[in-house]
Amino acid sequence: MTLKQLEACYWAIQLGSFAIAADRLNVTQSTLSKRIFELEDELGCLLFDRSGKRALPTETGRRLAEMAVQVLDLVGEIGRVAGRPSELRGVCCFGVSEMVALTWLPKFLLLVRERHPDLLLRPYVDLAGVLERKVVRGELDFAVAPGPGREQDLRRDLVKEVAFSWMAAPDRFPEAGVLTPDYLSDATVITMTDESGLTRSFDGWCLVQGIRVRKTIACNNLTTIVGLTIAGLGLSFLPTAFTESCVRNGLLRPIESIPSFPSLNYHFISRLDDQRDLVRVLRGYINEVADFADPILEWGGGNMNEMNN
Amino acid sequence: MTLKQLEACYWAIQLGSFAIAADRLNVTQSTLSKRIFELEDELGCLLFDRSGKRALPTETGRRLAEMAVQVLDLVGEIGRVAGRPSELRGVCCFGVSEMVALTWLPKFLLLVRERHPDLLLRPYVDLAGVLERKVVRGELDFAVAPGPGREQDLRRDLVKEVAFSWMAAPDRFPEAGVLTPDYLSDATVITMTDESGLTRSFDGWCLVQGIRVRKTIACNNLTTIVGLTIAGLGLSFLPTAFTESCVRNGLLRPIESIPSFPSLNYHFISRLDDQRDLVRVLRGYINEVADFADPILEWGGGNMNEMNN
DNA sequence: ACCGCTTACGAAAATCGTAACTATG
DNA sequence: CATAGTTACGATTTTCGTAAGCGGT
């Protein structure tokens, strides 16, 4: 019996698929299949029922997985206790919301490349809801996205509270004005599409305030929304820090609202059953970079100004 | 990190010697040394201090061993839960007292050879005290010997209570006599040597009875003692079952004593920290054969009778 | 000089991935 | 016919034992 076999069996059961488990362990499906077979062979009992299309774990398999995770946890702890510098290798697929991609991600990638040269990172940018589902399925190792999410059974660690505020092109909103529910119900609001954490937050806010917004433009791309807002197509709620340069350059004006738009908590989202060093270490790095990273975009180039008529 | 590495580190620390640990794991010292080095290399810290002659575990090494044993126990349990038939392989060195060697051992060896053809057994016959020390040192995987022993830190599982009685050649003791302390203090008693469990029991018995035996012949070989007793050189206390054929053939006569000689508990002796399947399974077999095995020797050949003058 | 551990090296075995294959829905 | 898992097979890698080496007592 080897640790690799136990690992293979455990993840195959947790993720419900040989293929996804193989991906996660950075081996081919053939290798994973063989490891599981070896384990079955040694134990002399079937761990999976292969009669159907998918391989379903048997009762024995499930019991084994429960014990296997204890073994794997212990082994991970041994490494930690011995003060191993956690040299991560292989491929790590993870998800980020667009705000994260445009602010924390670059520093994060630099940090990881510096500390773990043999780890290949594959960031995947999408809306929070999509990311969460992919983490649940095991297609992503983790995600950084605004919460609260819809999926249960995910571990969420607060990374940072991100302040949002309403924004508009300066000529679209009275200089000293305050955004009231009344005004809002008549204005065009540019939101992200449904799966987005921002939109979820917005919907909740409207519900609580009793506001019904009539005209919305929904777009799945935050950068585009900023562009549309700068172009004067409507109001939007945007991360304050993220749009700081726009405000500084006079492209956007933050608008006070009553009540103010709530800040949004960004989380490091991972599977509850995922005790891997990979996840633990990268979680730490995300926290590290979230405190300092600035947006990578400088808004306010010539073209933008030309659009802004 | 592999299970083999953890196993190597654990036993090297428990047994205090690479060489003995290697023996126990059925690998060469070179292999064990390399496994430990690989582990140290991966963890990036020393597990042993090699400055002296022996390799002494470092603090980190000791902590690792504590966690490693948990891992190994769990893995063993996984095998058990999955209903593995425990195919034992390699070499197993174990000790038996002479009584055991001449009664239970043959059936035990047959049983093991039948159920585990790939396991090579190396029985080693010696006195209980010697066996115990070798188990402590790790030179023997286990021993079957009469208790109570001297060594602490050994696990003792009762195998069987063995009845003893005083024996003498028929013409050396009055037919209907009863052995009294008085008589005993004047008679020649044939005992085993000091390290023997029988002798320990005898010494204890004398102490409690307040008997001081003046003339003793001490021999380290039970079969020889039987022969000496048959030859009429003195009294001895022998396992009742073991000498049954002698009594039947008129070579020995059991002598009632007041108080009677206590029975002796034979134990399966193993290290407290030894959770291996090997030990667990063989312990079961010993219990199995101890209930049925008869002595392999038939006493009473012609030569013996000639001696008995 | 002996004992205990390490190193060097070659043989044997295991591991792993590509690609072809089978079965299910 | 697309998806999920298995099998075949060859190449790389790992593992292991022999034998020599090395340092400490």
Image: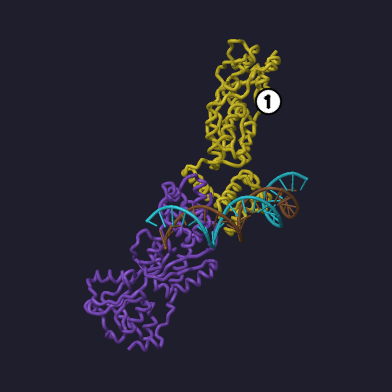
Chain colours: A yellow, B purple, C brown, D cyan
Which image quadrant: the C terminus of chain B?
bottom left
Q: Nearer the viewer, residue B138 or B36?
A: B36
Relative to B258, does residue A209 appear above or below in the rendering?
above
Q: Is residue A45 visible?
A: no
The residue depicted at 34 percent of the width and 78 percent of the height is B225
| Amino acid type shown at disc 1 | Cys
Q: Position of residue A183 (x, y in %)?
A: 62, 15
Where is residue A250 drawn, in percent x and y?
Answer: 62, 14
Q: Nearer the viewer, residue A181 or A227?
A: A227
Q: Is residue A82 above or below residue B102?
A: above
Of A2 and A271, nearer the camera is A2
- Residue situated furthest top in the rendering: A175
Circle 1 crowding by C-alpha within 10 Å: few under 14, some 14–19, many from 20 = some
Q: Which residue is mark 1?
A: A219
Q: Chain of mark 1?
A: A
User: Left of B109 or right of it: where is A149?
Assistant: right
Residue A37 is situated, as x and y percent measured from the top left of the image, at: 62, 55
Determine the secondary structure under disc 1.
strand
- Where residue A56 sits: x, y (%)? 63, 50
Q: Is residue A192 visible?
A: yes
